[in-house]
């Protein structure tokens, strides 16, 4: 009897999916997607997550968690599961689930929707949940240590080095999105720049005036943010201040690099912590408002379910549906980076083992929901506007007339007037070729929010609110990530040179910070100067690396299941592992070896180096120097892809070896902490 | 405790933990129970200790 409501829910979800999959030629409402996703997620949580908890992991509510047996009131604290859910969700949700789906919308809304829904249920949420479980049974150790414990020291070091490279790519691609959103936009630039003095004031407030009053200082900061958005319009319009806050992408790139280095060396209370409050609360608030807005507005989807770009050749990113859709939407469907979070603070805070499905599986479903909202956002825009914003300038030219012409030629009729009017509505000079996903989402959010509150007069305000919200938490991720990358690098170098480890002296910290910033700065600069807009090149590399980390986490999970002697349930992790390996290995190989220069790095390098030796300059390069830079960048990217392939293939070898060894044993060989039972209170 | 107050408490605790601040009262209770001889950090010291811990380590606490 208790199953009947769930069966009804499953039927509703199936019906919505059927409608989505079959409707052609007419616009359908976005709520079909939302309802299909929510009902699938609830049913998956109720049945699949519980199945994994009960039969695969055999969670035991009486077994003590690290929060109990290592309780210290600081790092290890038994925490209410609702509170912990919020903490975990805030840590995993970032720009990834917002940007990937927006980019994926170039193939229409259907492929992205289906991949997010299926991917999260079978792969993403399973990965987060498994890693959380594994770490929770091992004192809350981190992913690198877990791989070392279960698969050996070499595998652990490879995983750690892989994680550092992924961090570098993530930081570069995130910074690039900010550059693309703020370049030539004095209003956006002013509001984001204003957050720095604002954060410094907040830092001083929590340091000397009212220490520890997070709520108070956040409200003060929020008022400051709104004031910055409101005054930003006047600043942008002013003949003196406007040009002062107008930067080219290259200038912004250098500003970000300098800022990233500085921010990660400053004391955390001064800049990082106060901005963390603003970005975290703004993120949660904006995401909730977006959910409410979509339900209230119930907009129709104007993007077709499928576009002609499913075969490849799309303007936002190149490559066909398989495998590139599955790496373009990384966060939201499955994200390897979550393995680092699920083996971070969360496992040290779980009160009982039976909370793990809600937190591990549940929070990831929530992130998938965010991804669905981003996809809906991109799909309610006029496709003409979408493609005018997301195609590189090399395709569109720079003025609305040439852009309208080029987009219409793609098969999405749009007038130059509409492009000009949309730009004016959101308070920008132009929306042509504002790539990177963030501006597209901001236009969509402005559409939705202004429908609910303020009408079209508020569109410009909401657009800059959305840009600020995205830029703010991306910048916080860049600072925090640079610090984290610095510590990772110190750990790695410390393996060879022990005196390099964190906490020994000041110099290694500065050197490691410099190396970290230089690494992501290199890729950022390459992306910024890339004539195709950079997102085109960097996002796939990011997607491949992130999905490969997910494959690594799932391989670790598989090893653990074998060593627990639970191999008859190993399909739970093997199925998503195999799928991710197929996608990432084929995408990685294509990026490396494809003979199509728009896809393969080496083919692209060859095309340009042949031209160099023939003394020709190929568009979009304008000089021989640029030609050589393109060739060099291509080779670096190819090397990186090869490195990622090496990481995954070698860990695959370790996985198979460890699983076979575990099979030969007749008893469990996992390295779990011995079970202690929670004493009766 | 009334329902509204409970919701507010949970909301407040969630918001603080999101930025890396666990409840001070729990820490005090832990110290009183397990380390009665040690002097616990005061509220401000505890706040700063957690603030530093959040950003020093390879964890980072942030995702893409």
Image: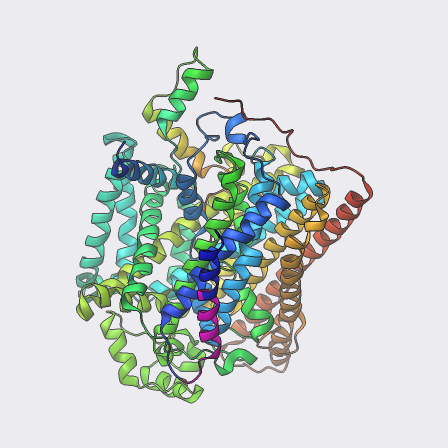
Q: Main secondary structure of the magenta part?
A: helix
Is A35 colored magenta in this rendering?
no
Which residue occupies 26% across, 46% down? Answer: A198
* Protein image colouring: rainbow
Q: Is residue A458 left or right of residue A84?
A: left
* Closer to us: B21 or A172: B21
Q: Is residue A21 found inside the magenta-colored segment of the image?
A: yes
Looking at the image, the residue that sits furthest to the right is: A664
Left or right: B14, with A594 as reference point: left
Q: Position of residue A78 (x, y in %)?
A: 46, 31
Q: In x, y percent, where is residue A344?
A: 52, 40
Residue appearing at x 26%, y 56% in the figure: A191
- Which quadrant holds residue A648? bottom right
In the picture, measured across the screen, residue A219 lies left or right of residue A493, that is left
Rendered location of residue A73, percent (x, y): 44, 26
Count of marks overlaid on the render: 0
Residue A37 position, x and y percent, is 45, 63
Q: Which residues are magenta?
A: A12-25
Q: Nearer the viewer, residue A229 or A604?
A: A229
Outermost residue on the top side: it is B37
């Amino acid at each position: 009897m208790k199953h009947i409501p769930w069966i009804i829910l499953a039927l509703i979800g199936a019906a919505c999916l059927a409608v989505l999959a079959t409707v052609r030629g007419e616009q359908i409402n976005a709520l079909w997607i939302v309802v299909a996703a929510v009902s699938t997620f609830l049913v998956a949580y109720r049945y699949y997550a519980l199945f994994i908890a009960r039969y695969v992991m055999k969670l035991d509510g009486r077994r003590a968690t690290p929060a109990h047996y290592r309780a210290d009131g600081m790092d290890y604290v038994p925490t209410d599961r609702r509170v912990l859910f919020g903490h975990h969700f805030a840590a995993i949700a970032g720009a990834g689930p917002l940007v990937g789906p927006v980019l994926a919308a170039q193939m229409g809304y259907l492929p992205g929707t289906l991949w997010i829904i299926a991917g999260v249920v079978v792969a993403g949420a399973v990965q987060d949940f498994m890693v959380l479980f594994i770490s929770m049974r091992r004192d809350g150790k981190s992913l690198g240590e877990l791989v070392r414990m279960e698969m050996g020291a070499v595998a652990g070091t490879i995983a750690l080095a892989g994680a550092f490279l992924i961090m570098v790519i993530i930081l570069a691609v995130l910074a690039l999105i900010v550059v693309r959103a703020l370049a030539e936009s004095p209003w956006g630039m002013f509001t984001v720049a204003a957050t720095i003095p604002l954060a410094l004031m907040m830092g001083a407030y929590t340091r000397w005036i009212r220490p520890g009053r997070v709520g108070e200082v956040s409200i003060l900061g929020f008022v400051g943010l709104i004031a910055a958005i409101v005054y930003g319009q006047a600043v942008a319009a002013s003949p003196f201040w406007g040009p002062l806050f107008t930067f080219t992408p290259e200038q912004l790139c250098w500003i970000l690099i300098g800022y990233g280095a500085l921010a990660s060396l400053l004391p955390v209370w001064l800049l990082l912590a106060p901005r963390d409050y603003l970005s975290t609360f703004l993120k949660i608030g904006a995401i909730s408002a977006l959910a409410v807005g979509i339900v209230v507005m119930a907009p129709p989807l104007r993007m077709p379910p499928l576009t002609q770009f499913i075969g490849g050749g799309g303007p936002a990113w190149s490559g066909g549906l398989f495998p590139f859709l599955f790496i373009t939407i990384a966060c939201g469907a499955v994200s390897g980076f979550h393995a680092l979070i699920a083996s971070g603070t969360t496992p040290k805070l779980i009160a009982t083992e039976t909370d793990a499905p809600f937190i591990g599986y549940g929070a990831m479903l929530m992130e998938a929901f965010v991804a669905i909202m981003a996809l809906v956002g991109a799909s309610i825009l006029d496709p003409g506007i979408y493609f005018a914003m997301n195609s590189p300038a090399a395709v569109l030219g720079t003025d609305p007339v040439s852009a309208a012409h080029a987009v219409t030629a793609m098969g999405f009729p749009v007038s130059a007037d509409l492009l000009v009017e949309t730009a004016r509505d959101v308070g920008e000079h132009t929306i042509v070729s504002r790539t990177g996903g963030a501006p597209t989402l901001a236009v969509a959010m402005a559409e939705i929010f202004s429908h609910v509150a303020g009408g079209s007069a508020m569109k410009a305000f909401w657009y800059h609110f959305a840009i600020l919200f995205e830029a703010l938490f991306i910048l916080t991720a860049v600072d925090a990530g640079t610090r984290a990358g610095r510590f990772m690098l110190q750990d790695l170098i410390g393996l060879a040179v022990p005196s390099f480890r964190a906490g020994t002296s000041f110099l290694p910290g500065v050197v490691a910070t410099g190396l970290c910033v230089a690494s992501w700065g290199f890729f950022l600069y390459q992306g910024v100067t890339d004539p195709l807009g950079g997102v085109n090149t960097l996002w796939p590399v990011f997607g491949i690396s992130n999905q490969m980390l997910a494959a690594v986490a799932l391989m670790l999970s598989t090893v653990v299941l074998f060593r627990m002697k639970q191999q008859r349930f190993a399909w739970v992790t093997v199925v998503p592992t195999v799928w991710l390996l197929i996608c990432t290995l084929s995408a990685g190989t294509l990026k490396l070896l494809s003979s199509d220069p728009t896809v393969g790095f080496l083919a692209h390098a060859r095309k340009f180096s042949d031209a160099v030796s023939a003394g020709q300059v190929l568009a979009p390069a304008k000089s021989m120097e640029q030609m050589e830079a393109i060739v060099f960048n291509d080779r670096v990217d190819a090397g990186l892809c090869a490195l990622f392939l090496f990481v995954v293939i070698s860990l695959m070898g370790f996985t198979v070896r460890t699983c076979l060894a575990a099979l030969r044993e007749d008893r469990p060989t996992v390295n779990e902490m011995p079970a202690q039972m929670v004493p009766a209170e | 405790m009334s329902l509204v107050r409970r919701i507010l408490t949970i909301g407040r605790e969630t918001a603080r933990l999101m930025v890396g601040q666990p409840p001070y009262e729990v820490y005090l209770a832990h110290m009183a129970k397990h380390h009665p001889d040690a002097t616990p950090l005061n509220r401000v010291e505890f706040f700063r200790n957690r603030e530093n811990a959040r950003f020093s380590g390879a964890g980072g606490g942030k995702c893409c």
